[in-house]
Amino acid sequence: MQYFINNIEVNFEKSNNEKWNKLIFNEARRQLDGFKNKVETIEYKIKVTDISTIDLNQLFEKAQVVPGAYSYFRNSTEEYFYINRNKSLLKITQDELTLYTTENLVYSIPFLINILLIKDDKIFVHSAAFSYKNDGFLFCAFGGIGKTALLAETRFNTEIKILGDDVNIVSATGELFPYYRPFCIYEYHKQLFSNYFEENKVIIPQATTKNRIIRKLKKYIGIYDLRDYDFATIAPHKLFGEEKLCGRSINLKNIYVMVRENGINEMKISKINSQEATDFALSVMQSEFNEYYRDVFSYFSLSGNSFTDYIGKYKTILEKGFYDKNVYKIRIPMNYDIKSVGPDVLKEIIV
């Protein structure tokens, strides 16, 4: 299976293990359904392959080891980083990243892509984004704030084109790139896409307290079950139609920090400075990708590089990309009806 994201080619290589193929290819579709069109220039590659094809004992005969946690080894052209808790191995070269994994792929592909994007002064921002009259609008927020509700409302404005629902790519030059990963649709989102669910037989797994506890226990003891989640993944073109997708990069013009607050009774929008937005966006990414940043920190420690420099570059790209933009904060009451978020926000910002 092959996907194309910006200037990165992502390949899921077929294994001799049919169980591996079935689970990994399903996970590939869950994370990347929507990325298919080939791009003109490929500069980096990501490969996902069966870990049983490599001899770990031989590879790490002379490795640095953190007992029970990580192993690290490098030669003149390659680095190898093994994460014990999920039995995954990263091989890193100048322009290619290979993930060796069991059938339980636990790594988020955006995390792997981010490792390569930063080389081109581009980074992921946890956000929703759309274009309007050739201007880029970016909405940075934690999960559950209203990003999906906002994009759902854009279906009714023909001048708005979607770039992404959960993460988007921002460059140091202030360019906004689409990222068409599937929407994660929870039960409470169904009311936003009622027509789609009426026309399609999509089942959203139900989350129960028991299931959540079991999932946490599994994760704690190192068991990662790809089938254990409580949302459905649906590609953007299926929810909105191909004609609604922007399909190209666009200049970033407006940035919105979205938060939910207690103690207010109505939505409020106020101007803030770009540094506030930069700090907020960085905090959100560290929170949403917290599990992976632990691995990144360990990788930098073992490889002799500086994690501080990595975060510093991340922040610099944000600062440059956000500089001289229109930046606002949207404060939404905690009890605000999810169906009202989209219409009310668009009413205030689209003129």
Image (spheres, helix red, strand yellow):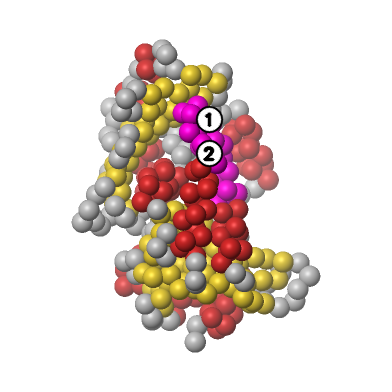
The quadrant where residue 219 appears:
top right
**Camera sees residue 236:** no
Q: Circles 1 and 2: CB distance less than 8 Å?
A: yes
What count of labels does the image hold?
A: 2
Decide which of tag 1 and tag 2 comes sooner along the chain. Answer: 1
x and y percentages locating residue 213 in the rendered image: 66, 39
Q: Main secondary structure of the magenta part?
A: helix
Q: Observer-nearest residue: 2 or 257?
A: 257
Q: Horizontal placement of 245 versus 264: left or right?
A: left
What residue do we see at 68% from left, 45% from top? 209
**Relative to 217, residue 119 above or below:** below
Residue 298 lies in the magenta-colored region = yes
Residue that numbered label 2 is attached to: 307
Under circle 1, the secondary element is helix
Residue that numbered label 1 is attached to: 301
x and y percentages locating residue 272 in the rendered image: 62, 71
Q: Observer-nearest residue: 148 or 74?
A: 74
In which quadrant is the N terminus drawn? Answer: top left
What residue do we see at 56% from left, 29% from top? 222
Q: Horizontal placement of 171 versus 206: left or right?
A: left
**Relative to 192, residue 114 above or below:** above
What residue do we see at 49% from left, 87% from top? 351
Amino acid residing under circle 2: Phe
What residue do we see at 67% from left, 66% from top? 260
**Relative to 201, residue 66 above or below:** above
Magenta range:
284-308
Under circle 2, the secondary element is helix
x and y percentages locating residue 339 in the rendered image: 59, 74
Amino acid residing under circle 1: Ser
